[in-house]
Amino acid sequence: MLQSKLFGQTIREVPRDELSKNAQLLIRGGFMDKMMAGVYTYLPLGLRVLRKIENIIREEMNAIGGQEILMPALQNKKDWETTKRWDIEVMMKIKTSYDKEFGLGWTHEEVVTPLAKKYVKSYKDFPFYLYQIQNKFRNEPRAKSGILRGREFSMKDLYSFHTNEEDLDRYYEIAKDAYFKIFEKLEIKNKTFLTYASGGDFSKYSHEFQTITSAGEDTIYICDKCGVAVNEEVVKDNKPECPKCQNKKLKKEKAIEAGNIFKLKERFSQPFNFKYLDKDGKEKLVLMGCYGLGSSRLMGTVVEIFNDKNGIIWPKSIAPFQVHLIKIGGGEEVKRQVEKIYQSCLDKDIETLFDDRGESAGVKFKDADLIGIPIRVVISEKTLSNNCVEVKRRKENKIEMIEIGKLMNYLLIN
Amino acid sequence: MLQSKLFGQTIREVPRDELSKNAQLLIRGGFMDKMMAGVYTYLPLGLRVLRKIENIIREEMNAIGGQEILMPALQNKKDWETTKRWDIEVMMKIKTSYDKEFGLGWTHEEVVTPLAKKYVKSYKDFPFYLYQIQNKFRNEPRAKSGILRGREFSMKDLYSFHTNEEDLDRYYEIAKDAYFKIFEKLEIKNKTFLTYASGGDFSKYSHEFQTITSAGEDTIYICDKCGVAVNEEVVKDNKPECPKCQNKKLKKEKAIEAGNIFKLKERFSQPFNFKYLDKDGKEKLVLMGCYGLGSSRLMGTVVEIFNDKNGIIWPKSIAPFQVHLIKIGGGEEVKRQVEKIYQSCLDKDIETLFDDRGESAGVKFKDADLIGIPIRVVISEKTLSNNCVEVKRRKENKIEMIEIGKLMNYLLIN
């Protein structure tokens, strides 16, 4: 992509009411624009990152047998009355002129349960797993954490359906593993802890995936021995204790909830009377699990973790481009060589942002640091005089000179 | 994909209130589920089709310089008041408990115009083109045309920005061509006509792309000489006339509007005071064009056009799978051979739905016709006795016997 043509240039100023670091950096870097509190437009750079995160999630969901569907954002009031959740405040509601009321989905148990009930009758059809990646809506009186907590946001929600608790337990563990594979690909696994949280009215605990960052809205207590954590909300009498080994020396941290998983069991099959016919010919209630993961929230989390005073430092797996190719100066030979390199990158499918603008070296370097593409390649008359380009990784200070003839090979293996 | 595992089996009955053929066929075929009037869930088969349509559109938008962004569905009341469109009935509105009102986007001029204004100042930055593929919402009192007119639907909207009218005219023609490339890939080009329609308050005409189908809600008059049409809404005194050649012998047809394009000119830059700095240092209003295309509506349109009494007949480009592999009977050799073929298809990236269910041949053939995958491959003891499989195209009646050893080659070139 030619940077001169890219819509969404870096900007120096951010909206004054934007307090969160993730939104500040993403807005300054030209990844997104703030329309109003908690509501953002993804610009070309930002949409590339979001889609990569969604695809990483999709890949792992498919790997554990998830079938992708797409449920509507519009919600049917009747179904939410069935579960007595219509009046939960988080739901945005639409009142039409023709006397119909709709909700906007912030979760989809009320859609997926009656849906599954229509199609599945026999024990032979179990287990099965349905997921979607979709924009959800939340009624947030004060949205102030950037894309960590938006009024409209991208989320993956997976629902599993089982005939017995052992099978639900089995799949629940598989889903946990899939989540950690996703965190590994996003390079936040070492900061993300399986966290015991409130189970609501249907289970002792649910599990959250909490990622340590000072921007987090939650407080967790980590057990170094077990590598798990407990959410402050379930700590009794101000005495945190590891739910696995009863260790009481836990480390307190601020964290952001990237995802959560619940054994719903009969919580939704019961009100919808979702039963299957068992081997013995008897009707039994279906057991369910649900597994949420915030794709746009993950984008914000990654930015909160991977940045320095100059900007974002994207992990390779979700960087908008792999290489930031920068031309310094306007000489003919520089132009010829940089265009040759750019063409080679296109030919080899190396995603490259080519800074072909007429800006100064200073502006270009500042923008490159802000945008945070993993590898920066600079070509100028000076580097050319040694038949070289200058290569710097965003996460390192070291600058390497690499012979032009060896550059493509370097980029392909890095 | 194993059909035994696929969520969303074919069903014999459709909701009684579902009158449209597209929704009836898509529901019976297991492509989508009706949640309520005008609101559908895309099941795995249906989502595959929708994504393919969206990708065809995306490819053509990228080819004409479009940069993909993603704007929010939530709309800011203030911006719609600026253009005096807040009270248009089609907008669904949300009233929150904290005294804020949001709209839900049915088009995005009110988002993209102030967005572009933030980032673009100089004539040097023009022209540029922004698009998104996103779910839109419409307040439809009676939604009764399946996915031809939903309350929530997938749409592509492209916006172009120019400094002069010649440039807007130039790009408008380019966009027209891109639309016909999309219709060609969907195999509906020969039924789709550039149609002169009302230009609203800012132009004599706008252009619609109308596809002939008896399910269409519009009436158009086609000029056979020019290959264009005129929408009934702009016909004066009940006397249709070709806007290009003044021919008065026009053919009346029912049609569905797949897309429409407008030269907005200053309609939105004016109220938002979106100006650029010209070469001569003067501030001038930006000129805009907008280009809408309904991705889910195109899916419904294709179904309305390509079907017979037994079900859907998908064009190859958007079929959920390319090959429907059907095993008849339970013999060991049939099982061994069909699994070998299925594996070869997977290895060669031929998208294949493998009907491995224990159903009768009759049920399987009926389902295959209903689902409408282009090539059906049947293997049974009878075909195996000739060392063959039976191949039938969905759109033809002819059945061919093909030697097993030659099958993969046949599938790869078809």
Image (spheres, coloured by chain):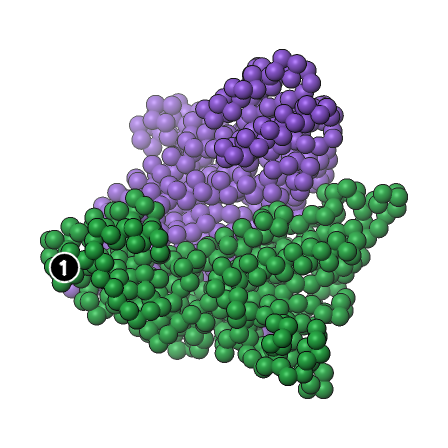
Chain colours: A purple, B green
Residue B68 x %, y %: 59, 48
The residue that disc 1 covers is B386
Residue B166 showing in the rendered view: yes
Numbered marks: total: 1
- The image quarter in which residue A340 lies: top right
**Which one is in front, B247 or B237?**
B247
Residue A123 showing in the rendered view: no
Residue B189 x %, y %: 53, 66
Residue A261 x %, y %: 38, 44
| Residue at the spot 57% in from the left edge and 46% down from the top edge | A150
Question: The residue marked by circle 1 belongs to what chain?
Answer: B
Name above or below for residue B18 compared with residue B115: below
| Residue at the spot 71% in from the left edge and 78% down from the top edge | B246
Identify residue type, mark 1.
Asn
Left or right, B143 with reference to B13: right
Left or right, B156 with reference to B393: right
Residue A164 x %, y %: 23, 51
**Which one is in front, A36 or A45?**
A45
Name above or below for residue A271 compared with residue A156: below
| Residue at the spot 64% in from the left edge and 16% down from the top edge | A383
Pointer 1 local density, CA inside 10 Å: few below 14, some 14–19, many at least 20: few
Name of the residue lying farthest toward the top: A386
